[in-house]
Image (spheres, grey):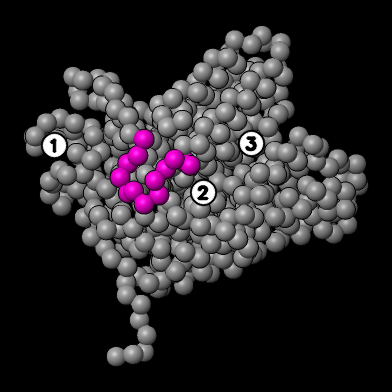
Amino acid sequence: MNSLVLLMLLPIIGSIAVAATPKTKEVLSKQVALATSVIVAIATIAMAMNFQRDNVDLQFVEKYSWIPTFGINFSVGVDGLALVLILMSTILAPIVVLSGWNEAHGGRWSVKTFYILILVLETMMIGVFAATDVFLFYVIFEAMLIPVYFLIGGYGTGERSAAAVKFLIYSLFGGLLMLASIIALYVMSGAQGGHTFDLQALSQLEMSSTTQNFLFLGFFIAFAIKAPLWPLHTWLPDAAASATPGTSVLLLGVLDKVGTFGMIRYCLTLFPEASKTFTPLIMVLAVISIVYGAILAIGQKDLKRLIAFTSISHFGFITMGIFAMTSQGHSGATLYMFNHGFSTAALFIVGGWMIARRGSSTIADFGGLQRVTPVMAWSFFLAGMSSLALPGLSSFVSEFLVLVGTFTRYPVHAVIATFGIVLAALYILIPVQKALHGPTTPSNEGLSDLNLREKVAIAPVMAIIIALGFYPSPLLNVINPASAHVIAQMGFTDPAPTNGDK
């Protein structure tokens, strides 16, 4: 199947099927949601098999008139960057459904409502990466807030309502800034040939440096909030701590990637000169995010907040790779987005099982799990090592590419960012030591290990983490041409290697 529109419709059709199931048939609702998400994942893999790796143009392009009065089209297409992120999203969706089989119980609404929201969100995740009409992108970008808001506020724990509102306010503020920039682009397009929201056409607009800088900021701030990048990150720890593990996987594993994806697709494409102007500032913010997120992660006592702060550090690496303006940095950043999605998914999923069994998310309440629940403990250990970017696991390759690509142009930033790797060893190994090793506390002695469903759910995540650690070429072969094309469009070439020869 090579239709992006049909791919977007499949989860919607599945959500309608879930809605049609009787309210008392909760298992049936789950089964329909799981079957739908599996079909979507298979369809996406089939599409990826037909992707032409060396073609840097948009592929699987579809365009339908939507609001012709304003020149708005339902226009979609993918390059290597978008395809990789859609693939990540659709593979994670069935894993989230299967791993969180019982996490919707106890929510404010029914179980089937939970899965309807998940499937609707999956449609939007596909659409936001595939959209090539800026207005369509904005609509999906904002519409994604609705299911996430209800997933956090309706099915989360603790201060879930406050966390959901904080997430919504931050995101709406950024969205309004982006909307102002989009309107300005639309007006300018009318003055230069015809009103349009087409991304390719808007990238050809002529504008003064001052105008470009202001419009760039409208987009960038919205994406920096979504990513999130320091100092616009404060909504994330609260949201991650309150959401269910499955929601957190989609929030940090997929939705936050919309921010870094938008930096490449929209900031660099529409405002190349402004991107160069603000690069020094953004590189500083990225380095601060790396170190700040790591330091705060070290001091966390709550498992879910710990994972959230590690992600702030990881998104600093991704942003740094994007604005290093080298092909290695861009390829590494894109691969990092994919790998982070699965390493974070593993941490949240296994961490969620640990919390559900222990009845607490406080790290100090765990201890000696390796003796009691060896499969769960080893799964958490591997997930932590992937987040640490241990050689042989997927995150190492992407982090290495980001650092190499950054060092060739910004050596000081790369050296400081490398310090974040040292801090990562602390924020991962300390909780691993406390939770998995040492004496088994009395409250943990009766904990059960992973059951068959949980093993099946976590197995593909672990397989991807290990496989891409040793053989990342299948993804890099798709990513590299798109990254090189972006760098060429920006007018950059990779710095020439230097040696002692004259």
Q: Which residue is mark 2?
A: 338
Q: What residue is shown at x 67% (from left), y 49% (from top)?
A: 462
- Residue 238 falls in which quadrant of the image? top right
Q: What residue is shown at x 44% (from left), y 25% (from top)?
A: 6
Q: What is the three-letter code of the residue carrying label 3? A: Ile
Residue 51 highlighted magenta (yes or no): yes
Q: Does the residue at mark 3 contact the one at mark 2 (Cβ under 8 Å)?
A: no
Element at label 2? helix
Q: Which residue is mark 3?
A: 95
Determine whether, in the image, residue 419 is placed left or right of residue 460: left
Bounds of the magenta span?
Answer: 48-60
Q: Height in image: 27 above or below 352?
A: above
Element at label 1? helix
Q: Does the residue at mark 1 contact the one at mark 2 (Cβ under 8 Å)?
A: no
Q: Which residue is mark 1?
A: 188
Discs 1/3, front: 3
Q: Position of residue 278 (x, y in %)?
A: 28, 57
